[in-house]
Amino acid sequence: MPSNEQRRQAAKRKLERQMQRREEQAKRRRVITIGATIVVVIAIVVGVFYFSRSDGEPAAQQQPPQPQVNIPTELAPPPARPAPLADPVSCAYRPDGQASKPVQPPANGEVSSKGTVQATIETNQGNIPLTLDRSLAPCTVNSFISLAKQSFYEGTNCHRISTEGLQMLQCGDPTGQGSGGPGYAFDDETFPELKYGRGYLAMANSGPNTNGSQFFMVFGDAQLSPDYTVFGTISPEGLKIIDDVARAGHDGAFDSSAGGGHPHKQVTFNKVNVQA
């Protein structure tokens, strides 16, 4: 039989083992609690950083800050020739390279230089109403109507916007690269007194008498030499859409050459309707 002393020693050892187990359990609980707290704090910090960077959108999708675009609100005076053209005029559309999209050139011959034509560019950003003016550029208006009726512009994107110095949106190239056209060219219809301003619709070109399908819509300043045929005007409603596209900025892809870049807010032509 164990003596009283032996029983006391056994009880003491048992108590010590119990206390050791309790201390180890308490230590494990402290480690788990501290670890969980650290995870929660890290999650909160990451969440705050994420939302402060992106306003709820992934930071990688954010566009770099764009400089503020100052756009005049006043329309330029309606363009007008100092002297009227003969009526009719003779137009010639000559072959020029490969067409970016299947299309037939307008017939060569006489075209009226009287009257205006209403047109509407239906885009993914909204409608842009235009007034095409035969008294300014009858051969250009004739070509634009022909291209529109053949659905040449459908599905094309405006590939370039410039917001400083020259403020305009350039469109009309099915390739979206700035080098495409309809496979024909025609002469300029300019005059020395020509000046450009907000609301003007003009032809883009690569030199004298190289007009094709590309055109630009002036929404602000445009200090250009009179080398670009103006063939109509843009409605105030249409200009509001272009202003919105301009304020979204561009990627600067053309800054080293022509200026501007691809619009951040893409403009796609769904259809061009003409009332002619």
Image (cartoon, grey):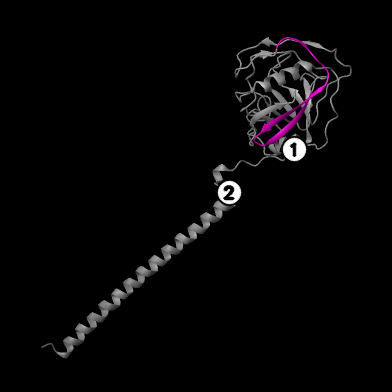
Q: Is residue 53 visible?
A: yes
Q: Quadrant of the N terminus?
A: bottom left
Q: Is residue 166 visible?
A: no
User: Which mark is drawn over residue 232?
Assistant: none
Q: Is residue 263 above or below residue 51?
A: above
What range is drawn magenta here?
107-132
Q: Pointer 2: residues within 10 angstroms few (<14), some, or many (20+)?
A: few
Q: Is residue 13 above or below residue 177?
A: below
Percent x, y for residue 48? Answer: 55, 56
Q: Amino acid at mark 1?
A: Lys
Of callouts 2 and 1, which one flags the residue occurring earlier in the amino acid sequence? 2
According to the picture, the residue beneath numbered tag 2 turns out to be: 54
- Which residue is located at x 81 percent, y 38 percent? 73
- Which residue is located at x 41 percent, y 67 percent? 33
Of 239 and 273, the residue lying toward us: 273
Q: Pointer 1: residues within 10 angstroms few (<14), some, or many (20+)?
A: some
Q: Quadrant of the C terminus?
A: top right
According to the picture, the residue beneath numbered tag 1 turns out to be: 240
Percent x, y for residue 106? Answer: 70, 14
Q: Amino acid at mark 2?
A: Ser
Q: CA distance from mark 2 to mark 1?
A: 28 Å
- Which residue is located at x 81 percent, y 29 percent? 197
Percent x, y for residue 173? Answer: 64, 23
**Residue 232 figure quarter:** top right
Q: Residue furthest front?
A: 276
**Residue 247 figure quarter:** top right
Of 106 and 187, the residue lying toward us: 106
Magenta stretch, main secondary structure, is strand
